[in-house]
Amino acid sequence: MLKCTKRLKWSRKKRSTGPGSREKKAPFSLTGILVKDMLEKQYYRSYNAYLRDLFGCRVHKITLDAGLTCPNRNGVKGWGGCIYCDRFGSGSNRYKEIHSIRQQLLDGKQYLQRRFKAEKFIAYFQSFSNTYAPLPQLRALYREALSEEDVVGLAVGTRPDCVNPEILDLIAEFQEKKLIWIEYGLQSFLPRTLELIRRGHTIDDFLWAVEETRKRGISVCVHVILGLPGEEKQDCLYTAERLAELDIQGLKIHSLYVNRETPLEAWYREGKYRPLSREEYVEWLCEFLERCPPDWVIQRLTGDPNPKEFVAPLWALDKQGTLKMIRDRFRQTKGFQGRRWKGWA
């Protein structure tokens, strides 16, 4: 185990997570003191702490629905989406109620200011693939989302096969004044798993997207799901180790849960799929994070299922209970993000 009292040598090239940054040094300088702080307090580099360090106040994401779709749903690469994807594309379905991105922003701001005392906001295009549209349409959407003065950043959720150089150039234009992240849904580094869950893209698609995104200095967050059909703990840890080799800046993780009217629900009803228990998920996740670079921003550790679409497992609805179990396990095992990372000097 790494000793917290020892000064740890660590460096990387071309790591940038702030607005307008391209090849700046990592803002997360590792020392024995900082590792000790991570070990004794939070165990991982949280998204909330990262935003507070950048902006000096409480910052929250506002989820937006641009009414887009996905090539894995409209027949270009497949129909109906991945085996677990609900009819809302893991989003809010707000577009059917409110077409205006600005109005969605205003509604979100009002709620977050009232509940969390948030002062600044990140416009987060979440539903479906938010680069899967003509360039002029995307430009209009992003500009509208960033038109509010207290919206300090843009996060674009998409697939690695739904970007091209022109789209990436467009998104890069905004980072001189705003914090910009692109979030790529990967889910697993195993090709057989991607085929089984009907992702419709390849590992090579993902690697190309990450490389091209980082060439433009845009921060990359990767989405991963633990407990996918056919995967054991070692498969998930393989994904962690492969991702740790790449120039990415953030990570979102959640367990695989079953939604209504999906192929996964049919598998679950037929006994062909068993969700992870909460104890299994916590164990897998903590070991996953231990293999991740300590400077990665961990943007999510558990999902937020829509109760109206949700089937199983019931524990996935208890987000705070799961987060407490994660902290408890790290405390008991003396673990933390990066403990088993291969990049330590």
Image: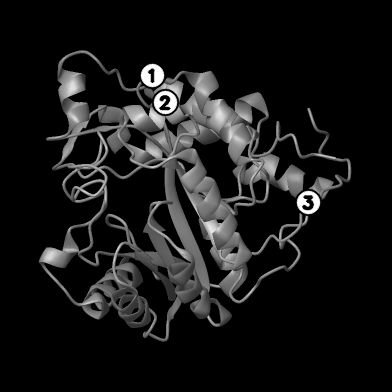
Distance between mark 3 and mark 2 Cα atoms: 36 Å
> Is 104 drawn above or below residue 125 in the view shown?
below
Residue positioned 83% across, 45% down in the render = 32
Task: Name the residue tied to disc 1.
Answer: 230
In this rendering, would 183 be left or right of 115?
Answer: right
Q: Earlier in the sequence, mark 1 or mark 3?
A: 3
Given contact means CB atoms under 8 Å apart, are the residues at marks 1 and 2 in contact?
Answer: yes
Q: Earlier in the sequence, mark 1 or mark 2?
A: 2
Task: Name the residue tied to disc 2.
Answer: 192
> Is 181 drawn above or below residue 191 in the view shown?
below
Given contact means CB atoms under 8 Å apart, are the residues at marks 1 and 3 in contact?
Answer: no
- Type of residue at label 2? Arg
Residue positioned 30% across, 29% down in the render = 315
Graded by Cα atoms within 10 Å as few (under 14), some (14 to 19) or many (20 or more), the crowding at tag 2 reads: few
Quarter of image, res 238: top right
> Is 142 drawn above or below residue 293 in the view shown?
below
- Residue 334 in the image: state x and y as whole percent: 68, 29
Q: Check disc 3 and report its element: helix, strand or loop.
A: loop
Q: Nearer the viewer, mark 3 or mark 2?
A: 2
- Residue 280 in the image: state x and y as whole percent: 44, 21
Q: Check disc 1 and report its element: helix, strand or loop.
A: loop
- Type of residue at label 1? Gly
Q: How many marks on residues?
A: 3
The answer to whether one can see residue 300 in this image is no
- Type of residue at label 3? Leu
